[in-house]
Each structure stands twice: as structure tokens, then as C-alpha cells.
Image (spheres, rainbow, N blue to C red):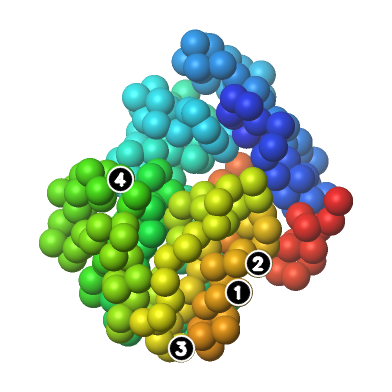
Amino acid sequence: MAGVIGAPVGHSKSPKLHGYWLKRYGIDGYYVPLEIAQADLAEALRMLPKLGFVGANVTIPHKESVLGLADIVTDRAALIGAANTLIFRPDGKLHADNTDGYGFVENLRSGAEWDPKAGPAVVLGAGGAARAVIASLLEVGVPEIRLANRTRARSDVLRAEFGTRISVSEWINAGDMMEGARTVVNTTSLGMVGQPELNVSLARLSAKAVVTDIVYTPLRTAFLERAAEVGCQTVDGLGMLLHQAVPGFERWFGTRPAVDDATRNHILSV
């Protein structure tokens, strides 16, 4: 058994995704939603292995807290400051990893003709998702990251942590960062259903850029539509969700699942 830990957790698509893969590959396993309050998290993590769980995904608000409860934390989870994948090892140790950056990179690689080393990347937003995106972009060789957030101080913190390949601009000047960029990423919630639109100017954006949005409700945000009108390759955010789930499923259930059209269609079905 495995599951997803959060509070609330009813919105998560992970049970639908992992349940699909379990059935597809004929694996005798279960993946369930686990709504666990912050005050109960430590006790729950001790109990779940005793109940037969081999691991779990972690979502809001526990992604940072689990780092302090884990026995083993991967370098990338430590760098990002959050974990989304837990493994309950046979020796009793709790192993914490973060696969969000992996999911982000694999989504771009599978969804576009993307060369991370071709030029600068623009990252909009400086929250938890931005940390995973920045870490993964630096790892795959993006030469420069241009960062803007509505609150400047949060961008400055990320620059201090991740180093001189990051430059920070004021949010009002975010459109100017598009000049010469070859990768553009929206990590904010702007453009999501129920949220204001992302109104950053794309006037200086080149058609050579690959543009992605980690939002996937709606699947095609207005931001992606505007980038497509410029002539850019665009990649929606659903693939990030699907790809980040692959390493955990493989570790827990012993089979590496495929992220393909059938998987996407299942998650998009009602």
C-alpha cells in the first residue's frame, strides 16, 4: 500500500493516477488518500509502515515538515527544502525525496524540442514550486535564470540560496526579462481557475522559446495561448504531475510506469 498525505487531500489526482497504473500493470496494491493533520503527522509516519504502507506522496501543508521527520533526505530534497515522495524502508528508516523537479524537466523533454542550454530561462514566481523548478533548471545546465515575483524579497532569498546564475527583476519589469529567453516558466497560481490572469507582457518573447505553465486547471491557460500566438512551443502543466509520480511508483511497486496519451486521457476523464 501507498498513499498521499495532506490536509486537505480530497483534491489530489494522485489516487486516480496511481490506481490507474496499478490496474494497468496488474499489480496487487492500493494507493489511498490520507488526510492527516499537522499535529498528527509524526505519529502517522511511525504508524503507516506498521499498517503495511511502503511509501507515500506528500502534499500541502506537509512537504516541508516531513524533512525534519525523515532519517534520510536526498540532496535535491534538501536543496529544494521540501519532499513530495517518502519511502518506508525495510530497515525502518524514513527516506524523503523530491521528484517535482524531475517531473518538470521530463515534462518539457517529452512535450517539446527543448534544449535547456540554448539560452536563459525566465521563472515567474518564487514559492515552493519555483524552488523545485530552479534547482532542476540549474542541474540540467540552463546558463542563466531570470527571476521575478510579486514580492521582491522572496526572489532575493532564492538568489542568495541558489547563486549567481540567478538574476532578479521587479515584477513590473517581468516582460523585459523575456528578451532572448529560450525557456519561460510560470510557477505562480495566476491563470488557474478562480485566480486572476497572468498579465506579464510577451512583447519581447522570441518564437524560439519553450513556454510552460505548472498550472493544469485549465489545461491551456491564457498565458500558454498568448505564447502560442507568438509562435512558441508550449507545454501544459499536467505532464509535470504525471512524470513526478513515476519514481515513487517504481520504488513502491517495482514497475516503472509509462506516461503516455492513455495516462493523460485517464486523468483528464471525469
Q: CA distance from mark 4 to mark 3?
A: 29 Å
Query: Which one is in front, 171 or 231?
Result: 171
Q: Residues within 10 Å of mark 1 (few under 14, many from 20)?
A: few
- Tags 2 and 1 in contact by the CB under 8 Å rule? yes
Residue 209 falls in which quadrant of the image? bottom left
Q: Is residue 63 above or below residue 266?
A: above
Q: Amino acid at mark 4?
A: Thr
Q: Few, some or many C-alpha atoms within 10 Å of disc 4 (few <14, some 14-19, many ≥20)?
A: few
> Disc 1 designates what residue?
225
Residue at the spot of label 4: 151
Q: Amino acid at mark 3?
A: Ala
The circle drawn on residue 207 is 3
The amino acid type, in three-letter code, at marker 2 is Arg
Q: CA distance from mark 1 to mark 3?
A: 13 Å
Q: Secondary structure at mark 4?
A: loop
Q: CA distance from mark 2 to mark 4?
A: 26 Å
Q: Nearer the viewer, mark 4 or mark 3?
A: 4
Q: Going from the N terminus, do you reach mark 2 or mark 3 first? A: 3
At 42% from the left and 27% from the top, the residue drawn is 66
> Which residue lies under the disc numbered 2?
220
Classify mark 2: helix, strand or loop.
loop
